[in-house]
Amino acid sequence: ASAFPKGLQELGLVGCGIGDAGGSALLQWASQAPALKMLCIEENLFSDELKRKFHKLSKQRPAMILVV
């Protein structure tokens, strides 16, 4: 996830089998990617706790569309 450019506006990783370790890396990257407008990461293997963290980020950035 750290290799994704910070200027990326849309990212879709649907059904990729990503677990909490990869999801945490995505969350960290997304929180530092100010241009991100849409993040679609549903159908992965995230815990409920990690999903809550993504929703918290989404509330902090209301212009970003998040699908978990």
Image: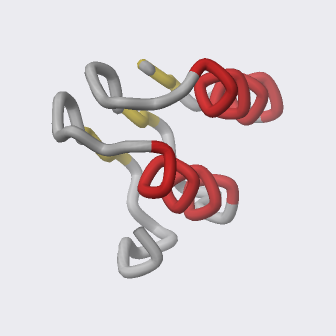
Circle count: 0
Q: Position of residue 44 (x, y in %)?
A: 30, 29
Q: Position of residue 59 (x, y in %)?
A: 78, 23
Residue drawn at (67%, 64%) of the image: 32
Residue 55 in the figure: left or right of residue 36: right
Residue 11 in the figure: left or right of residue 65: left
Residue drawn at (31%, 44%) of the image: 18
37 or 42, nearer to the observer: 42
Residue drawn at (46%, 77%) of the image: 2
What colour scheme has been applied to the protein in the rendered image? secondary structure
Q: Position of residue 7 (x, y in %)?
A: 46, 68
Q: In the image, is residue 3 above or below residue 48?
A: below
Q: In the image, is residue 46 above or below residue 10?
A: above
Residue drawn at (41%, 68%) of the image: 1
Q: Position of residue 64 (x, y in %)?
A: 58, 31
Q: Quadrant of residue 50?
A: top right
Q: Residue furthest bottom?
A: 3
Query: Quadrant of the image for the C terminus?
Result: top left
Q: Quadrant of residue 39?
A: top left
Q: In the image, is residue 25 above or below residue 19?
A: below
